[in-house]
Structure formats: C-alpha cells, structure tokens
Image (cartoon, helix red, strand yellow):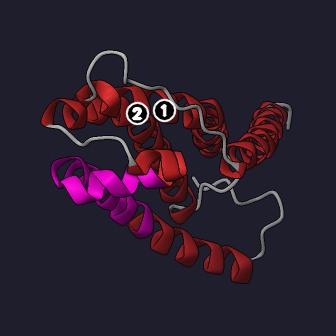
Amino acid sequence: MPSTDLSLSPAPLSRLIRLSRVMEMVTWFGIALVTILTALALLIQDWTRNIALAKLGQAGMTLPITPLGQAVAGLVLAIPVGVMVYGLFAARRMFAEFASGEIFSERAARHLQTFAATVLAQAPLGPLTATAFSAALSLGNPPGLRAITVAFSINDYFALIVGGVLFAAATVMREAARLAEENKGFV
C-alpha cells in the first residue's frame, strides 16, 4: 500500500511519480554511460590523457601513457567509478520507490541515504584518486623520474557539502518515516 497519506495531494503526487519514472530511466542511462565511457577512456590513449589533464591539470600533460600505466590507472579509477555506480543504483531504487507511490517510506529514505553516502565518499576519493592516478601513469618513467601529484578540486569540497546535506536530510526523512510507521500502530 503506497505511503502517500502524509500530505501529498493527487496532483503533486502524480507529477512526482512521472518525474521519478523519468529519473529512473536517466539513472539507468547514467550507469551505462559511466561504465562504458570509463572503460573506453582506459583503452584509448588520448582519452586516458584527457582524464590525466582533468584530474591533474598541466601535470597530467607530461606523464607518459604506457600500457602498464593505463592498466594500473584503470584499477585506480575503478574505485571512485564503482562508488559512483553504486550510488546511482541507490538513486534509481529511490526513484523506483517514488514511482510506485512509496514516497514517505523508510526504504526510499534509506536509498537516498546510500546515495548521499556515495556522494560524500567522492570528497576524499577525488584527491586520493588523483594522487594514485599520477603514480600509476608515472610508472612509465624511469626510476628517479617517477612522480606523485596531489590535486584538490572545488568539486571535492562541493561533494563533501552536498553529500553531507543529503545524508543529513535522508537521515531525518528515515527517522520521520520510522516514527510515522510506529505511530500507525497506535491508531
């Protein structure tokens, strides 16, 4: 039975259900796109170079792109991409809950909380990934010329704030849903 009895009238509920169905498809598309493009970016040297430039700035321009470096860089990038895809699956499940009318459920709030945790995790993963990525690509340099670059981005800070806000809101929503369910038992 849909948990829509908390105050969502039929018109806003209908709009939210339609939006959720669209967003469910968008997240499926995003999951596929992120996975495919990441794999391609690690197979095509020019695309690997673009990732190096995006993550490391000008320091990424001088790093050699060798097959070993690409392979190790792929392993490094698998971690944040895996976290991102896991978060997108949680967002998709949340939208599926909303699309089925389960708006104020603890389960939907838990999915949002999981998504928020993955956004929050991107904050430390950004600089750690950039550092490990530069080390992986510099494996192609001879000993003594290998380098590690540490890079911080405003996006890392933004992920920290947005992830924290989403996690706090999801925690409040989850507790509210739990209390609402508990109060149903008293009536």
| Image x and y of residue 183, in percent | 85, 35
**Hey, what amino acid is under mark 2?**
Phe
Q: What numbered label is drawn on residue 81? A: none
| Image x and y of residue 72, in percent | 26, 28
Question: Which residue is outermost to the top?
Answer: 143
Task: Indicate whether 63 appears above or below 33.
Answer: above
Residue at 43% across / 61% down in the picture? 27
Residue holding disc 2: 133
Asked if one can make out residue 75 in the rendered structure from this viewpoint, the answer is yes
Residue holding disc 1: 129
Asked if one can make out residue 37 in the rendered structure from this viewpoint, the answer is no
Tell me, yes or no, whether the two marked residues, 2 and 1, touch with CB atoms within 8 Å: yes
185 sits to left or right of 140: right
Q: Secondary structure at mark 1?
A: helix
Q: Secondary structure at mark 2?
A: helix
Give the residues drawn in magenta, as a range.
26-53
| Image x and y of residue 92, in percent | 46, 54
77 sits to left or right of 149: left
Which sits in the foreground, 58 or 27?
58
Which sits in the foreground, 72 or 78?
72
Residue 5 quadrant? bottom right
